[in-house]
Image: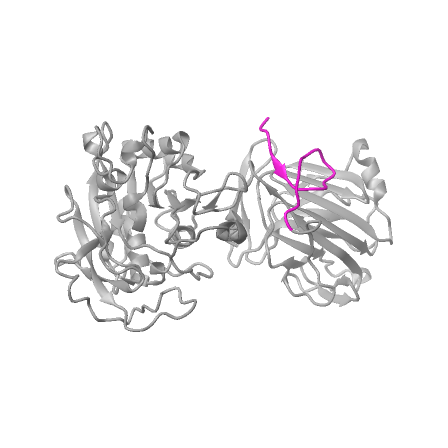
């Protein structure tokens, strides 16, 4: 059985733990005055406030109603007091979700059988800790709302104490502990459910008022909640370490893309999840986005250069998109990348991927390092030179003050990767490369170095540069450097593969529609879908909110304080 290490304090279980926040680690989810931080989904039951109590009141002819936290939680201990009318069923959702559009979800039963289920738009679904005042008395049991039904009911002799612990017409106390794949409940201090299930790692908390149909005897019945407090838990080994986006309909259905984030400067941890969402939600590709993870805390830490879990997905991937900088990954993780390249897997490199790796002397992966100049002749220059066409050379434009205007190479305007692209611009400066690029490298877009016309303002992620800037630098555009090109590659003993590289690709570059379309068109081209690229180009609308931050190095305690988690990038 796999060992787990938990970090939290004060749980009624045999784990070593510390609080996730200050003092006792618990934070109130209800301020006692307003429903700020909550939103209602599903039915239209009434939610009101009476003193320090949230009151849910049933209404006829509506579906189940849910008052949901806006924030999502992964691993936590939740405590709450409730009092329910004997005629009214209710429950508390944990790790739950609701979608704006219908979705298909794959569920797996305890016997290992998987099923695909359709979740309608607006349907709250996820784990529910039951509140059951009926004679059945399954309060504290775990039901999978909107998906699989009962997962851990309280029938049988072993659950007799839990069934008897519920107090009719009185206040009851729940403790709900969700850590990794373990969900446990207590009712008035008595252990109730004990479930192992890994279907959903995070989601919102919600207070349910069950639908009553047309039953007039149940109209106006109430459920009350108070003292709602939650302690977030940080545990390392089973914390979610990557995000996966299941492809919807589209030409990419059935194809798998692995997107590798891992740079300290250009916010690959922001841009690649958005690219993965676009590819999956608008084009049908199954996408896994992997991140640099601090193994001690489970948080995303771009400054951690030695750990990117989840790369095993490359074993059957159709495309690898890489945006790393000077990484030195452990052997097991590098082996997945090496195996992928040996089978000639398609590659898209973004921005710092030309200098993706930097291993110390003596490492078996030293030849991947930027500027490698060792005994392995084919690897001269490292991964960037061999696979993508160039290693790190220089900033050709002035960093943070000169932007990049994409100029299509003469004769390449009909290339499928440029189909429907239009204007290309980004605030990152042009990188220097050596001309001509090696082998069969084919430049598609050149980078015109453009002067900034305005002045940088405080907090401006574009450093004062704008896509309306039009003055070319007088001395840096003859010749212009390629910023997008294609290339084939072959590692020693491996099969022939194909790559597209762009030295653009910061999260702020991604605000430009042309940059986004070059990347999505490239995905189509490298996965055998060139004929499916529309004449107007592929769809590149943002999925959800996308507000990139400025590219820059962030040192010291910035990332520990930022406490970035995988759950931030899930599709809600």
Q: Nearer the viewer, residue 566 or 124?
A: 566
Left or right of 193? Residue 277 is: left
Q: Please say whether residue 20 is one of the residues in the magenta stretch.
A: yes
Q: Quadrant of residue 219?
A: bottom right
The vertical placement of 306 against 465, above or below, is above
The vertical placement of 404 against 417, above or below, is below
Q: Nearer the viewer, residue 56 or 394?
A: 394
Q: Nearer the viewer, residue 200 or 271?
A: 271
Q: Position of residue 372 (x, y in %)?
A: 24, 36
Kindly tell me whether residue 343 is visible in this rendering: no
Left or right of 397? Residue 438 is: left
Q: Which residues are magenta?
A: 1-21
Q: Quadrant of residue 550?
A: bottom left
Q: Quadrant of the N terminus?
A: top right
Q: Position of residue 317 (x, y in %)?
A: 36, 38
Q: Position of residue 89 (x, y in %)?
A: 76, 53
The vertical placement of 151 against 23, above or below, is above
Q: Nearer the viewer, residue 148 or 411?
A: 411
Query: Which secondary structure dominates the residues rendered in magenta?
Result: loop
């Amino acid at each position: 059985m796999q060992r787990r290490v938990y970090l939290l304090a004060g749980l009624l279980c045999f784990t070593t733990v510390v609080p996730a926040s200050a003092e006792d680690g618990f934070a109130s989810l209800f301020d006692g005055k307003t429903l700020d931080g909550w939103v209602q989904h599903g039915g239209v039951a009434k939610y009101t406030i009476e003193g320090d109590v949230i009151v849910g009141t049933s209404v006829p002819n509506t579906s189940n109603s849910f008052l949901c936290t806006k924030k999502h939680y992964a691993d936590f201990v939740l405590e709450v007091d409730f009092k329910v009318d004997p005629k009214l069923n209710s429950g508390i959702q944990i790790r739950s979700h609701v979608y704006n559009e219908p979705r298909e979800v794959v569920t797996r039963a305890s016997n290992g059988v998987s099923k695909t289920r359709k979740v309608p738009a607006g349907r709250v679904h996820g784990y529910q800790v039951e509140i059951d005042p009926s004679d059945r008395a399954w309060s504290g049991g775990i039901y999978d709302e909107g998906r699989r039904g009962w997962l851990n009911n309280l029938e049988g002799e072993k659950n007799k104490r839990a069934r008897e612990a519920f107090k009719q017409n009185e206040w009851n106390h729940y403790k709900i502990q969700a850590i990794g794949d373990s969900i446990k409940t207590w009712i008035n201090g008595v252990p109730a459910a004990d479930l192992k299930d890994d279907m959903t790692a995070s989601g919102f908390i919600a207070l349910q008022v069950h639908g009553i149909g047309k039953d007039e005897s149940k109209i106006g019945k109430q459920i009350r909640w108070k003292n709602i407090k939650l302690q977030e838990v940080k545990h390392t080994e089973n914390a979610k370490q990557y995000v996966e986006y299941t492809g919807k309909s589209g030409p990419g259905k059935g194809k798998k893309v692995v997107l590798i984030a891992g740079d300290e400067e250009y916010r690959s941890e922001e841009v690649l999840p958005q690219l993965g969402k676009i590819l999956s939600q608008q084009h049908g590709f199954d996408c896994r986005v992997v991140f640099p993870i601090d193994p001690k805390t489970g948080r995303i830490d771009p400054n951690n250069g030695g750990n990117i879990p989840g790369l095993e997905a490359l074993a059957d991937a159709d495309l690898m998109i890489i945006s790393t900088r000077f990484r030195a990954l452990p052997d097991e993780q590098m082996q997945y990348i090496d195996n992928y390249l040996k089978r000639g897997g398609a590659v898209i490199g973004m921005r710092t991927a030309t200098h993706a790796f930097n291993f110390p002397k003596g490492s078996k992966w030293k030849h991947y390092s930027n500027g490698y100049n060792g005994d392995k002749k084919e690897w001269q220059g490292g991964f960037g030179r061999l696979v993508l066409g160039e290693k790190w050379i220089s900033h050709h434009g002035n960093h943070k003050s000169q932007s990049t205007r994409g100029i299509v190479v003469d004769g390449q305007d009909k290339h499928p990767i440029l189909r429907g692209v239009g204007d290309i611009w980004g605030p990152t400066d042009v990188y220097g490369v050596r001309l001509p690029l090696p082998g069969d490298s084919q430049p598609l877009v050149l980078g015109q170095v453009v002067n900034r016309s305005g002045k940088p303002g405080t907090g401006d992620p574009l450093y004062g540069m704008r896509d309306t800037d039009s003055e070319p630098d007088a001395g840096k555009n003859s010749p212009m450097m390629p910023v997008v090109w294609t290339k084939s590659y072959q590692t020693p003993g491996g099969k022939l593969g194909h790559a597209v590289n762009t030295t653009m690709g910061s999260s702020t570059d991604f605000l430009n529609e042309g940059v986004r379309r070059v990347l999505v068109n490239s995905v189509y081209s490298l996965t055998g879908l060139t004929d499916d690229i529309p004449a107007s180009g592929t769809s590149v609308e943002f999925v959800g909110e996308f507000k990139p931050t400025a590219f820059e190095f962030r040192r010291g305690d910035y990332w520990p304080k930022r406490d970035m988690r995988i759950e931030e990038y899930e599709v809600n």
